[in-house]
């Protein structure tokens, strides 16, 4: 048993040394040796790199490259890489191509009267859509535009002109509770000229007279507009008395 | 065409040339090299022409480029923004305009821009209130004034938006490269690539990002992705101002090209004292503030 093992070891060593000899003789089998043999043989080598076949190969390679490039060109925009990596480019283009909502601010082409009034007023320079809804819905939904404005007129004004901590002191603002509470802003103010329309001043003396409503009942006497709301005496005088404009001016600042 | 293995080989004979004895094996003669070159030149020219022709075939009739996209060169601009906090009246129309223009959800938590009211205490610290992101304006008394006990040194409105940082943390943390910076300096989000992980929302020091909630209003039609102010990229590439700038009744928001020294923003940055928010972070915002009183914001 032991002897047999020693014999196996000896045989293995012999095989190893003979394999080393074979390896060092550089007669490697396989494609590397075959190529070396061809390179060593002038005749075989001239066949390996025959010029005519080389030209053909070059043409084939160039044709393949151009086909790949052309196929790439088919699937690529001319703006490829303009904004960075390809997907970034596609995303950037998508952001650019979104539709705009506000403007172009061409309301003045039709609404010239309002524009002319606004050009000289404190609201000059504002785009119409600051107060009105975006014109993108217009003129297809003119009623929608008007309703959206009419319903919240005072609220629209108050958005900017209600007195609030933090507003610049020079900005015209009113304390809503103290400046004709309950009245629509547009009753006195023209939003386009942004100027207050003075109520007609009482042309006769007020001393020793009964309440205004005694004579100026709704529908009774002249100079009571149809849309004018019925009111008690004290409210009448808050508007219709001499010097009211100066009074409003002091309040609104 | 040359085999590197041949470089070490002895020179081989050409057709009866003088080098015959010294170099007995020539696989390719000079004449053949010239022939090869002469053949390669027309091949290359031909393939180039073929490439050009197929490129033209691919783009001209079948894929018309949007003229707006084609006319816009993003490398020719550097967009900048100036917020004049001293003139803002806090009407919130900018928030309304932004949400309408971009289809942003109408609630306060998901917004691209918002208006804050800063009550600056005598020590410079700031108490902030921003009811409904300022979308309905500030009709009530300042809640921030109560915070400071009514002893605010200054109370002012501060419009907020994405700072479009030149050194933007959001683009750095994005694990999928969905948010990126355009050459003209606007940070955009690729909604097709965004996975909605929210890293950018957390990374933004200005709170300018949000994840689009599922609902009727989605800026890109995709919910669950990050969204943010784009400076109204679709407007500025058409030569218009962002919607918030256009709508502002007092000109508190100013937008322009920093590459143009005559633009309003360039003039302001050159001639007036402006500051950026949280400058210590080194984010290099493209949004500058004028007349900002509070500190540490």
Image: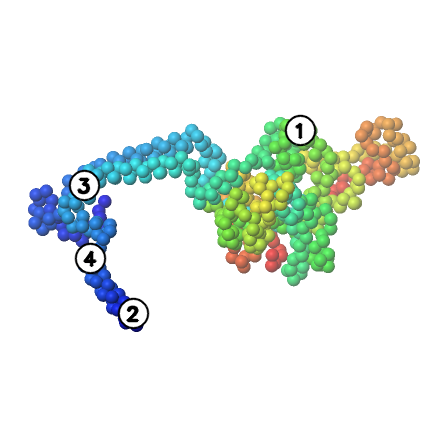
Secondary-structure class at tag 2: helix
Asked if residue B297 lies left or right of residue B36, the reply is: right
Name which of mark 2 and mark 3 comes first in the sequence: 2
| Quadrant containing the C terminus of chain B in the rendered view | bottom right
Q: Determine which of the numbered discs, if any, sits on residue A142 in the image.
A: 1
Q: Are marks 3 and 4 in contact (CB under 8 Å)?
A: no
Q: Is residue B294 above or below residue A188?
A: below
Toward the viewer: A171 or B118?
Answer: B118
Labels 2 and 1 share a subunit? yes
Q: Are marks 2 and 4 in contact (CB under 8 Å)?
A: no
User: The residue marked by circle 3 belongs to what chain?
Assistant: A
Q: Is residue A6 above or below residue B192?
A: below
Q: Spatial distance from mark 1 to mark 4, Cα to Cα?
A: 95 Å
Question: What residue sits right under mark 4 in the picture?
Answer: A26
Asked if residue B39 lies left or right of residue A216, the reply is: left
Q: Spatial distance from mark 3 to mark 4, Cα to Cα?
A: 28 Å
Question: What residue sits right under mark 3 in the picture?
Answer: A50
Name which of mark 1 and mark 4 comes first in the sequence: 4
Name which of mark 2 and mark 1 comes first in the sequence: 2
User: The residue marked by circle 2 belongs to what chain?
Assistant: A
Q: Are marks 2 and 3 in contact (CB under 8 Å)?
A: no
Colour style of the rendered protein structure? rainbow
Labels 2 and 3 share a subunit? yes
Question: What residue sits right under mark 2 in the picture?
Answer: A5
Specify few, some or many for label 3: CA neighbours under 10 Å numbering under 14, 14-19, or 20 or more: few
Q: Spatial distance from mark 2 to mark 4, Cα to Cα?
A: 33 Å
Toward the viewer: A156 or A21?
Answer: A21
**At 23% from the left edge and 65% from the top edge, which residue is drawn?**
A14
Labels 2 and 4 share a subunit? yes
User: The residue marked by circle 1 belongs to what chain?
Assistant: A
- Number of marks present in the image shown: 4
User: The residue marked by circle 4 belongs to what chain?
Assistant: A
């Amino acid at each position: 048993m032991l002897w047999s093992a020693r014999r196996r070891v000896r045989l293995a060593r012999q095989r190893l040394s003979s394999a080393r000899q074979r390896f060092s003789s550089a007669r490697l089998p396989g494609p590397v040796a075959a190529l070396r043999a061809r390179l060593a043989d002038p005749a075989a080598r001239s066949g390996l790199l025959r010029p005519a076949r080389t030209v053909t190969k070059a043409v084939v390679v160039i044709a393949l490259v151009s086909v790949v490039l052309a196929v790439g060109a088919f699937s690529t925009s001319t703006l490829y890489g303009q904004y960075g990596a390809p997907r970034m480019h596609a995303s950037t283009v998508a952001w650019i191509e979104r539709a705009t909502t506000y403007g172009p601010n061409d309301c003045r082409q039709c609404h010239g009267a309002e524009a002319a009034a606004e050009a000289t007023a404190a609201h000059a320079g504002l785009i119409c859509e600051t107060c009105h809804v975006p014109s993108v819905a217009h003129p297809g939904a003119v009623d929608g535009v008007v309703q959206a404005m009419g319903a919240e007129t005072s609220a629209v004004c108050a958005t900017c002109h209600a007195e609030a901590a933090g507003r610049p002191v020079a900005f015209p603002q009113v304390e809503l509770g103290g400046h004709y509470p309950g009245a629509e802003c547009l009753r006195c103010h023209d939003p386009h000229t942004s100027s207050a329309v003075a109520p007609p001043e009482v042309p006769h003396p007020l001393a020793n007279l009964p309440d205004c409503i005694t004579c100026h009942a709704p529908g009774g006497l002249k100079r009571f507009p149809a849309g004018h709301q019925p009111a008690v005496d004290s409210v009448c005088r808050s508007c219709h008395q001499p010097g009211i404009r100066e009074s409003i001016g002091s309040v609104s600042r | 065409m040359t085999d590197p293995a041949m470089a070490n080989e002895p020179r081989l004979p050409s057709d009866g040339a003088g080098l015959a004895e010294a170099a007995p094996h020539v696989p390719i003669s000079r004449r053949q090299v010239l022939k090869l070159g002469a053949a390669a030149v027309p091949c290359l020219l031909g393939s180039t022409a073929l490439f050009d022709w197929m490129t033209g075939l691919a783009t001209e009739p079948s894929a018309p480029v949007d003229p707006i996209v084609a006319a816009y060169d993003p490398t020719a601009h550097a967009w900048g923004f100036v917020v004049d906090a001293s003139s803002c009246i806090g009407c919130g129309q900018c928030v309304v305009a932004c949400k309408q223009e971009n289809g942003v959800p109408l609630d306060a938590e998901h917004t691209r821009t918002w208006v804050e009211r800063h009550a600056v205490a005598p020590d410079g610290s700031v108490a902030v209130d921003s009811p409904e992101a300022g979308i309905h304006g500030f009709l009530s008394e300042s809640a921030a004034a109560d915070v400071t006990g009514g002893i605010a040194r200054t109370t002012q409105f501060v419009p907020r938006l994405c700072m479009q940082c030149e050194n933007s943390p959001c683009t750095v943390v994005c694990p999928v490269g969905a948010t990126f910076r355009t050459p003209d300096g606007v940070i955009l989000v690729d909604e097709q690539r965004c996975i909605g992980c929210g890293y950018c929302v957390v990374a933004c020091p200005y709170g300018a990002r949000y994840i689009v909630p599922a609902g009727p209003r989605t800026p890109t039609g995709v919910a669950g992705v990050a969204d943010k102010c784009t400076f109204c990229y679709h407007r500025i590439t058409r030569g218009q101002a962002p919607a918030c700038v256009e709508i502002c009744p007092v000109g508190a928001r100013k937008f322009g090209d920093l590459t143009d020294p005559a633009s309003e923003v360039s003039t302001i940055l050159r001639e007036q004292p402006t500051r950026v928010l949280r400058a210590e972070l080194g984010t290099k915002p493209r949004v500058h503030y004028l007349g900002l009183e509070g500190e540490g914001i």
